[in-house]
Amino acid sequence: MNQIEELKTKIQKLVNQFNFGNYKLVIQEVNILLKKLPNNSFLLNLLGSCYQKLGDFDTAIRNFLQVLSTDQKNLAAMNNLANAYKDILKFEKAENLYKEIIMSFCKQYKLIDPVIMGCSMGGRVVLHLALENCDYFKAVIALEGSDKLEPYYDLDWLHRPDVHGGLVQAAFVSSQIAPQSPNNFKHETLWHYMQGGPGVFKGDLYFYWHDGDFDDRSNLIDTSKCPVYLLSGEYDCSCTPERTLETAKRIKGSKATIIPGIGHFPMSENPELFKSYIYPILDEILK
């Protein structure tokens, strides 16, 4: 087999891996090939597409632009670039709308010194609110909501015509529930995830894993004006205890608690255990 045929075989294998969703593996292999073929348009497009699938749009766009810098008529790069920008605009609007809805609700009801608590993506957004509205909230409580997370599965499975969205959503999050949580609450939590509309959970996780990251600014939260409480379950494999403790180090003055025997959904998977941890925090805030 000559070098050209060998290269074609390698590329076809990478395309197969891409189609199976093994994006991180493809990135590693493509980067090796790019050392020998630094301006190969197909490889750069494939690399950018992998980053786009993983939600890293900035890196994806850089690869597509690199293709167009040497091949201005490359239709694949043009199409990929347009889709990347479209996805960025779509999710950025969702993040801003999310914060606007919360603040509109609070102000419409003329709340005085409100305390806000959110879980998962709600735990992430309340940290944004603490940064942007520290004079308004009396305190924020972030459940399973650190300032920086790393994706660990492919979001495209959550919105595909050949996959039952509700079932795959419940399957993914089932790993984040503590094994000792009561079965009735465990299944009720999973049932809620089965009710999600097409593409909703995928959008939630884009904010939670990508667009909502702000570890470069979380240290600006003023806890003297707006106290911050961080709680994470020991069985949470998404917002792990380690991630929570790292966030607490960046947010000076915040208080972090790791709850044993509970997972990613403290208030719904084990309400009684959760109450034993949240009540003392609420008492402290009210003092």
Image (cartoon, grey):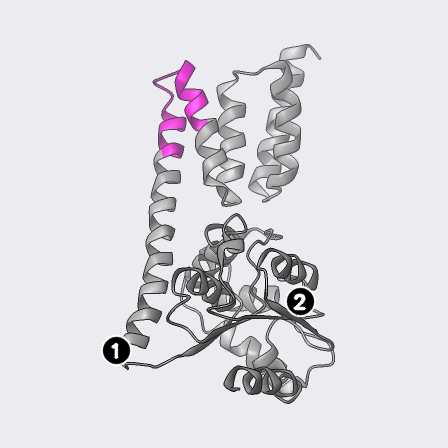
The amino acid at mark 1 is Gln
Q: What's the residue at 58%, 44% (across, down)?
A: 21
- Read off the residue under disc 1: 108
**Looking at the image, residue 150 lies above or below residue 16:** below
**Looking at the image, residue 16 lies above or below residue 54:** above
Q: CA distance from mark 1 to mark 2?
A: 35 Å
The segment highlighted magenta reads: 64-81
Instruction: Sort mark 1 into few (<14), some (14-19) or many (20+) by Cα contacts within 10 Å.
Output: few
Instruction: Sort mark 2 into few (<14), some (14-19) or many (20+) by Cα contacts within 10 Å.
Output: many
Q: What's the residue at 55%, 84% (across, down)?
A: 282
Regarding residue 159, the answer to whether it shows in the image is no
Q: Quadrant of the N terminus?
A: top right
Q: What's the residue at 49%, 59% (across, down)?
A: 221
**Are circles 1 and 2 on residues that touch, CB within 8 Å?**
no
Residue extending farthest to the left is 108
- Read off the residue under disc 2: 236
Residue extending farthest to the top is 2
Regarding residue 254, the answer to whether it shows in the image is yes
Q: Secondary structure at mark 1?
A: helix
- Residue 174 picture location, percent across and down: 63, 70
Residue extending farthest to the bottom is 272
Q: What's the residue at 46%, 67% (across, down)?
A: 126
